[in-house]
Amino acid sequence: MDLDHWLGAAADAIADWQRTFGAYDAHPSVAVSDERLGAALAELTSRLTDNYPFFHPAYAGQMMKPPHPAAVVGYLAAMLINPNNHALDGGPATATMEKEVVGRLADMFGLRTHLGHLTTSGTIANLEALYVARELHPGLGIAYSSEAHYTHARMCAVLGIDGTPVGADAAGRLDLDELDALLATGRVGTVVATAGTTGLGAVDPVHRVLEIARRHGVRVHVDAAYGGFYALLAGQDGLDPAPWGAIAGCDSVVVDPHKHGLQPYGCGAVLLADPDVGRFYLHDSPYTYFTPGDLHLGEISLECSRAGAAAAALWLTFQVLPPTPGGLGQLLAASRRAARGWADLLQESARLSLYQPPELDIVCYFPAGRAMSAIDAASARILSDGMTSGAAYLSTLRVSAAALGRRHPGIDADQTDARILRSVLMKPEHEAFVPELHARVERLAG
Ligand SMILES: *Cc1c(COP(=O)(O)O)cnc(C)c1O
């Protein structure tokens, strides 16, 4: 894939279309000399070198990687027109593409009916799901695991909802007994299950959560912002299909195409199982054009302006790497093999310990030490030495003494929590690089 070629082809095709409207003179106020733009661009690209190499497999820190070339080309082509998916007249072509990609996401989760749209982020997508939760059960609270993304507690505060964290089990999954007891109080209207936690990549047992919630007449929202595309691998290579299969029976789900969907930032998605909740979005805008009958995207989104280019980028990506086990699933399978491969090496290591077996593609580990304080200090040092030398770009995760002690009894809890190391292996290239990465981190730990 020659990116130069495809970027040129996209720009040419849009210019051809623009010419069909006839020639006109650009205003002199927008003219800039090539010399001036060239100099400014040189400064920009130089400043952009102040970055971590997110593209490289030695970068094994946060959930970051560049978008697929297809997404870049799709985004650029549409961006040259700059449609706004707020309203149908803001960009009919990209509005239709948005419906198509959202339909594919709904199919991926097995939803029989849905009302959904893209958002600028998983944060906004979750906010919308919690907003609908509040409208359906006014006065009732929302429960989420203590391992859930912090956005749930924060958005409950924004929405004026009572949010209650529920403890996690020894594998970092929502504790079902605690949930059952909380729901029995009748104070909760919706439970958030996380299919792939941001810290550990743990998958809450969505099927069990759903069973318990339904028994209490409670709704279920699934936050699959990070893990959602792993639904493509349900039942493969030991990935328990039950939580993924249960998403089809839940009330709403969120997934971030800008995490595992190869997209640039600005692409989350929310899907609500009951299309009737569209009534909570009704607004009376004097500006936007409404097509009677079919609810259009501007009528089912809390955000107004949204990049049509984000829909085009995801659409073009899905044309070449569809959200199927044989398409995008192949990339995710490689990431998961990378995580399990590294876990095997960590289990043999004298210098590093595996925190818990990885379920998806996040591996957490820590330098050998007798006390929490030593583990914390060594983790911080490895993080910093790895980045300074360029040997490995990792991230850290703060864990409590109780959580660490549960998995690794015998460590002296001389402080309440400690940083351990965390790596998201979300690039398929990580699979081949794992032995090298492991050797580098072992050297850093030595
Ligand atoms: C990343 C993430 C979010 C927040 O999504 P953004 O796209 O960063 O706003 C919410 N929940 C989970 C589980 C996540 O991993």
Image: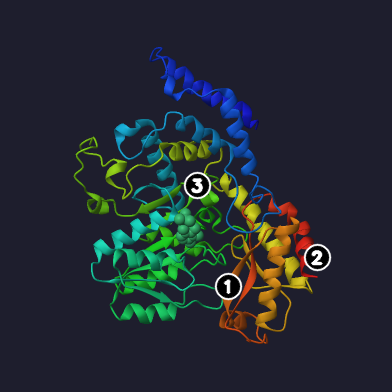
Crowd around label 2: few <14 · some 14–19 · many ≥20 (10 Å): few
Residue at disc 3, CB closer than 8 Å to ligand 1: yes
Residue at disc 2, CB closer than 8 Å to ligand 1: no
243 with respect to 160 (left or right): right
Query: Marks 2 and 1, how far apart in space?
Result: 23 Å
Q: Please state which of residues 405 and 25 is positioned toward the viewer in this rendering.
A: 25
Tell me, yes or no, whether the two marked residues, 3 and 2, touch with CB atoms within 8 Å: no
Give the percent coordinates (x, y) of residue 221.
38, 62
263 with respect to 408 (left or right): left
Q: Is residue 446 visible?
A: yes
Q: Which residue is mark 1?
A: 398
Query: Marks 3 and 2, how far apart in space?
Result: 34 Å
Tell me, yes or no, whether the two marked residues, 3 and 1, touch with CB atoms within 8 Å: no
Q: Which residue is mark 3?
A: 265
221 with respect to 205 (left or right): left
Q: Which SS class for mark 1?
A: strand
Q: Is residue 391 visible?
A: no
Q: Which residue is mark 2?
A: 443
Q: Please state which of residues 305 and 411 is positioned toward the viewer in this rendering.
A: 305
The correct choice, above or below, for 391 with respect to 139 in the image is above
- Spot the residue most to the top: 23
Give the amino acid at mark 3. Answer: Tyr
Q: Residue drawn 41% across and 37% down? A: 308
* Of the image marks 3 and 2, the number of the one nearer the N terminus: 3
Q: Which SS class for mark 3?
A: loop
Crowd around label 1: few <14 · some 14–19 · many ≥20 (10 Å): few
Give the amino acid at mark 2. Answer: Arg
Give the amino acid at mark 1. Answer: Arg
Q: Residue drawn 48% across and 20% down? A: 15
Query: Marks 3 and 1, how far apart in space?
Result: 26 Å
Q: Classify residue 26 by image quadrant.
A: top left
Give the percent coordinates (x, y) of residue 332.
60, 52
